[in-house]
Image (cartoon, rainbow, N blue to C red):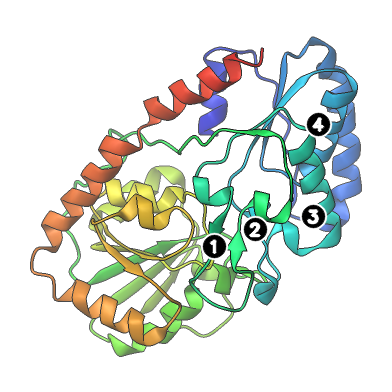
């Protein structure tokens, strides 16, 4: 949505939302998408897709057929494969095909972090030793330009007293076949009983069917305008995912002065830097040691302010806006 807001400053934007919630509905979505493309492509200067996959196949195909320039903003799932949890576009044959076709035939790929292009994956040993779309698409020639996500520090800030020893995680699809493990909820359920004096809040956790430990609070999804007050109250932000690109909730939590505790995947170690804690491997003993160190940190409030400054100085909304508009201007 933020990128649409940016594009609307310079262009007349026509939006199409491809609903992926029900696979049985895909044929209907493809028909709707084809009609939308044919109704708008002749007057279009540029086709922009958020993520590659089934939903980008027709836009990129028609862009090629009608000599229109096209761009894909790569965000995460379209760049990885994790067979251990059946996750990622490169994990299934058909999605691998449509994703590869899209990346090969667009004019520009704009990943939100370099690790989505390719990096060594060392967090756990059950999947590929590398992740990123160039690892799965050998010899890809499409131009790539990394543009980080950006955030408005005036919207995300701390205006509340922190609840001592409180941890928060925000996720979507946590009740799905892969979401529970993908977002590291399995680790939270395992570690929580070791710290009975603390509380772990999981926003979006109400769909989880597994019985939660007593100190894990499974919350409903909440509207975006209610997230900032909740983050303001929390002392730590947990992001223990198996895979991430450049997670928005983590960065927004840091702007709200939550001290981050993250897994060593994707862009998170770079985002956090020396402003929090990084779980090097998916190991419950390592996580216990990390959380114990965090809870025993007498200067945790200062670290939270440092986390805010890290995002405020390095990942601004204006920076993403300027870089995104500049990249697109070269194509139109």
Q: Quadrant of residue 239?
A: bottom left
Q: Which comes before the other along the chain, label 1 or label 3?
A: 3
Contact? badges 1 and 2 (CB < 8 Å): yes
Q: Residue 276: percent from the left, percent from the top?
A: 26, 61
Which label sits on residue 59? Answer: 4
Of residue 44 and residue 176, the one placed in the foreground of this image is 44
Asked if residue 249 can be seen in this view, the reply is: yes
Q: Which comes before the other along the chain, label 1 or label 4?
A: 4
Q: CA distance from mark 1 to mark 4?
A: 27 Å
Q: Which comes before the other along the chain, label 2 or label 3?
A: 2
The residue pinned by badge 1 equals: 243
Q: Quadrant of the N terminus?
A: top right
Q: Residue 127: percent from the left, percent from the top?
A: 63, 73
Q: Which comes before the other along the chain, label 4 or label 3?
A: 4
Q: CA distance from mark 1 to mark 3?
A: 17 Å
Given the current orientation, which residue lies at the most extreme left position? 298
Q: Secondary structure at mark 4?
A: helix
Q: Which comes before the other along the chain, label 2 or label 4?
A: 4
The residue pinned by badge 3 equals: 96
Q: Secondary structure at mark 2?
A: loop
């Amino acid at each position: 949505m933020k990128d649409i807001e940016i594009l609307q400053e310079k262009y007349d934007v026509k939006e199409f939302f491809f609903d992926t919630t029900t696979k049985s509905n895909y044929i209907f979505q493809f028909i709707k998408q084809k009609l939308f493309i044919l109704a708008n492509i002749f007057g279009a200067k540029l086709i922009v897709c958020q993520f590659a996959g089934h939903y980008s196949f027709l836009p990129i195909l028609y862009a090629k057929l009608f000599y229109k320039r096209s761009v894909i903003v790569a965000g995460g799932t379209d760049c990885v494969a994790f067979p251990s949890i059946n996750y990622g576009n490169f994990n299934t044959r058909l999605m691998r095909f449509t994703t590869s076709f899209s990346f090969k035939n667009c004019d520009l790929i704009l990943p939100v972090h370099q690790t989505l292009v390719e990096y060594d994956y060392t967090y756990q040993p059950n999947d590929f030793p590398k992740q990123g779309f160039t690892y799965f698409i050998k010899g890809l020639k499409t131009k790539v330009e990394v543009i980080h996500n950006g955030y408005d520090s005036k919207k995300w800030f701390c205006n509340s007293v922190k609840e001592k020893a409180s941890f928060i995680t925000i996720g979507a699809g946590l009740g799905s076949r892969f979401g529970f493990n993908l977002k590291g909820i399995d680790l939270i359920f395992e570690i929580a009983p070791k710290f009975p004096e603390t509380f772990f809040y999981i926003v979006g956790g109400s769909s989880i069917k597994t019985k939660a430990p007593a100190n894990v609070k499974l919350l409903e999804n909440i509207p975006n305008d209610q997230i900032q007050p909740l983050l303001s109250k929390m002392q730590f932000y947990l992001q223990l995912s198996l895979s991430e690109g450049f997670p928005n909730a983590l960065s927004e939590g840091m702007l709200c002065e939550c001290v981050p505790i993250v897994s060593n995947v994707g862009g998170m170690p770079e985002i956090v830097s020396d402003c929090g804690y990084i779980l090097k491997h998916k190991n419950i003993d390592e996580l216990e040691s990390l959380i114990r160190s965090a809870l025993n940190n007498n200067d945790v409030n200062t670290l939270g302010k440092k986390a805010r400054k890290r995002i405020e100085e390095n990942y601004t909304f204006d920076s993403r806006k300027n870089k995104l508009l500049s990249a697109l201007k070269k194509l139109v």
